[in-house]
Amino acid sequence: MALIDCKQVSLGYENRIVAQDINFQVNKGDLLCIVGENGSGKSTLMKAILGLKDTESGHLHYGDGLTAKQVGYLPQQTTAQRDFPASVFEVVLSGCLSSKKHSIFYNKALRQRATDSLQKLDMLPYRNRCYRELSGGQQQRVLLARALCATTTLLVLDEPVSGLDPLATADFYKLIRRINRDYGITVIMVSHDLQDALSLATHILHMKQSGAFFGTKQEYLQSDVYRAFTGGDNHA
């Protein structure tokens, strides 16, 4: 059964439809990249996937036992977030918030989960450093570790390399590939860079204001949607 099943979905806000006829499935182990023109509804779709916005029509459901609390989310980072005055460990530990029961304290198991997430992303030596003193690439690693605290199943990433330099961007994409392949975590990622998306993705959802293309990376490379978007270039 698919982790996410989206059928005939239309999305909108303020009485305006921004995307319609969206159909796709996300299965365990997939790395789905969402691409497309500005204003095509990518961010709105992300909110719907996270349960933060209702669809105008159609249905978008979790399956295979997945719930909203089991989804790790990495939003676009704001300037205010970059200057957050907390330790690296405190930032990552806050990703366990949805797993806390009826206590104001994080128990030993949750603190171990945060430690393990830092270890996976090679950031454990920085656990006591102040978050705002880190480089942009290091901060994104910390926020990714925070998102991992919420899930062993599905990560949702909204343009996670926005504002990073080319070296940090390449490094971050390697982490995404490792998380997907080595740890078996399914990934949905919005990207504005088509070539980087194609280097990572198993599947592509190309958003348009009327309809959307969904298929494997190879199906997308052979599609009219790809050719029109890239001016006829059929090389990834």
Image (spheres, rainbow, N blue to C red):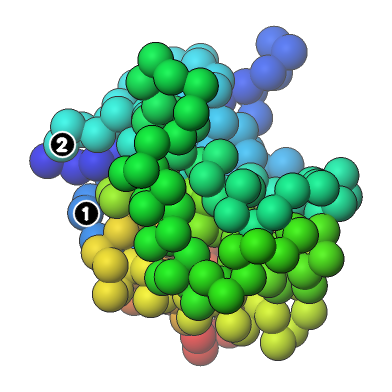
Residue depicted at x 40% and y 27%: 100
On residue 208, which mark appears? none
- Between 110 and 160, the residue placed more toward the observer is 110
In the rendered image, which residue does mark 1 sit on? 28
The image position of residue 211, as x and y in percent, is 49, 40
The secondary structure type at the circle numbered 2 is loop
> In the visual, does 103 lie left or right of 14?
left
In the rendered image of this protein, does residue 4 appear above or below residue 33?
above
In the rendered image, which residue does mark 2 sit on? 64
Residue depicted at x 74% and y 58%: 131
Residue depicted at x 15% and y 36%: 64
- Between 234 and 196, the residue placed more toward the observer is 196
Q: Earlier in the sequence, mark 1 or mark 2?
A: 1
Q: Determine contact: label 1, label 2, CB under 8 Å.
A: yes
Residue 50 in sight here: no
In the rendered image of this protein, does residue 32 appear above or below residue 236?
above
> What kind of residue is marked 2?
Asp
- Between 151 and 104, the residue placed more toward the observer is 104
> In the visual, does 166 lie left or right of 93?
right
The secondary structure type at the circle numbered 1 is loop
The N terminus lies in which quarter of the figure?
top left
Q: How many marks?
A: 2
Q: Residue furthest left?
A: 1
Residue depicted at x 42% and y 47%: 111
Query: Badge 2: how crowded within 10 Å, few (<14), some, or many (20+)?
Result: few
The image position of residue 224, as x and y in percent, is 48, 66
- Between 103 and 80, the residue placed more toward the observer is 103
Residue 120 in sight here: yes
> What kind of residue is marked 1?
Lys
